[in-house]
Image (cartoon, grey):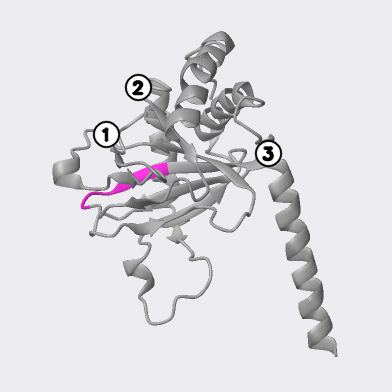
Amino acid sequence: MPFLQPVTDTDLERLALDRVVPCLLNYGFFYVDNFLGDLIGHCVLDQVKEIHNSGLLHDGQLAGRRYGVSKRHIRGDKIAWVTGTEKGCEAINFLLSLIDKLVMFCIGRLGNNNIRERSKAMVACYPGNGTGYIKHVDNPNGDGRCVTCIYYLNKNWDAKENGGVLRIFPEGKSYVADIEPLFDRLLFFWSDRRNPHEVQPSYTKRYAITVWYFDSEERAEAKRKFRDLTAISQDRSTS
């Protein structure tokens, strides 16, 4: 279905230059409310619910091995990866195109980061059974992820009752940032060790879409290291 442009490119550029860039550089995170508007936001929510109801969400994976610890106590979300081009993801694709434009206007202004690509979109649901995601860093080991971007989809969310707050612990700061996962809220923050964060236990079904934007040089180096490690492993297995 066609979607009306809720904001112009000029609006997105102004948002990027006046708000996103200064806040990322000064505070390490930024969020904006009413990003798509109620109508299109509901279209995205309906498509995410359809993905969920179709049984396409699976347990989120953990990086590395954590012996003796239940996965559910670390990360309780269920996820699916989408490009946005799949049938039934038209509104999600529209959302991603706007976020891409917004990030494009930030390129060259975020320190030494050179952003040229991003991940697929991770559609995620915390089932509402008190699960969350313990304090962690998205990119602790230089895998290329530079900026984390999350779009929230939760109508009439009351953090006191529903939980599910994203708490960011900005490195070297004396404060934390509590971000409620409110409907049509778009959040940006650095993906590396500057922003450890946690998802506090959710007691109501909690939906979000996350994409990661890559620093091209760090991403290329991470891929090179992976290829080298894979080659070494294959050599050992055949020797």
Residue at 49%, 16% (x, y): give it: 15
Farthest residue, direction left? 161
Work out whether residue 35 can be spotted. yes
Q: CA distance from mark 2 to mark 3?
A: 28 Å
Residue at 36%, 22% (x, y): give it: 34
Q: Which residue is mark 2?
A: 38
Q: Quadrant of residue 159?
A: top left
**SS at circle 1:** loop
Viewer-side label of 2, 3: 3
Residue at 72%, 42% (x, y): give it: 216
Q: Is residue 233 magenta?
A: no
Q: Which residue is mark 1?
A: 155
Whichever of labels 1 and 2 marks the residue nearer the N terminus, that label is 2
Residue 105, which numbered label?
A: none
Front residue (pair 6, 213): 213
Q: x and y percent of residue 136 in the render?
A: 42, 57
Q: How many residues crowd around disc 3 within 10 Å: few (fewer than 14), some, or many (20 or more)? A: some
Q: Amino acid at mark 2?
A: Asp
Image position of 12 with respect to 89: above or below = above
Viewer-side label of 3, 1: 3
Front residue (pair 57, 234): 234
Span colored in magenta: 203-208
Q: Quadrant of residue 152?
A: top left
Whichever of labels 3 and 1 marks the residue nearer the N terminus, that label is 3
